[in-house]
Amino acid sequence: MINQFLPAIFISIVVAFIVVKNIKRITEKMDTDALNPHAAYAQFSAHIQEYIRDMKKDLNKSDISDAIFALTDGKDLESAQEKLSDFIRKLVFFETNMAKNRTKEDIEENLAQILFDLDSFVRENFENGILLADKMKEDLQARFEEARS
């Protein structure tokens, strides 16, 4: 009779151990988020900046045959580089202490506007802009989910 209960007891102990570990992990994450709720936005902002820097690197390549981000004919290189630099300047704000004084909704609204403008810029200025913008959205959405978890 005890032999029948031993596997059930063992499984119960393993399940309890897993539950306790997960609860501990979740509460630690909640404590970290409570101390610095804007950390996810700062991290996400850094990811967007990396993406933009990759665009700028491609624009600066002398051999554009392997560039992912290539300007469409007729677009001004200097103007495009300046616009990308403007995006980076706007995004750096989310990593500063001043951003911590803003509400979550305000930060999300500002980030959404920057992302909308960046999406429009990519669509209008790069060869295969629509495909690149769609890929960028997918990549950044995954990064945002990663930053929030």
Image (cartoon, helix red, strand yellow):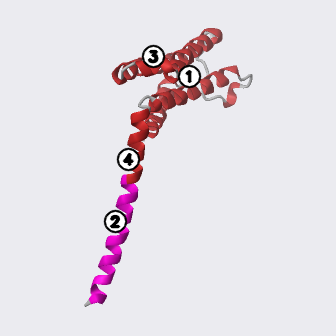
- Answer left or right for 64 relative to 92: right
Q: Earlier in the sequence, mark 4 or mark 3?
A: 4
Query: Magenta region: which residues?
Result: 2-23
Residue mark closest to the camera, 3 vs 2: 2
Q: Please tell me whether residue 145 is drawn above or below residue 73 in the rendered image.
A: below
First-in-chain label (1 vs 4): 4
Per the rendering, the mark at residue 16 is: 2
Residue extending furthest bottom? 1
Relative horizontal placement of residue 134, taking residue 64 as reference (left or right): left
Amino acid beneath label 3: Asp
Q: List x then y, in percent, for residue 61.
A: 71, 23
* Residue 38 in sight from this viewpoint: yes
Which residue is the site of mark 3?
Answer: 117
Identify the residue under disc 4: 27
Q: Amino acid at mark 2?
A: Ala
Q: Which residue is mark 1?
A: 127
Amino acid at dot 1: Glu
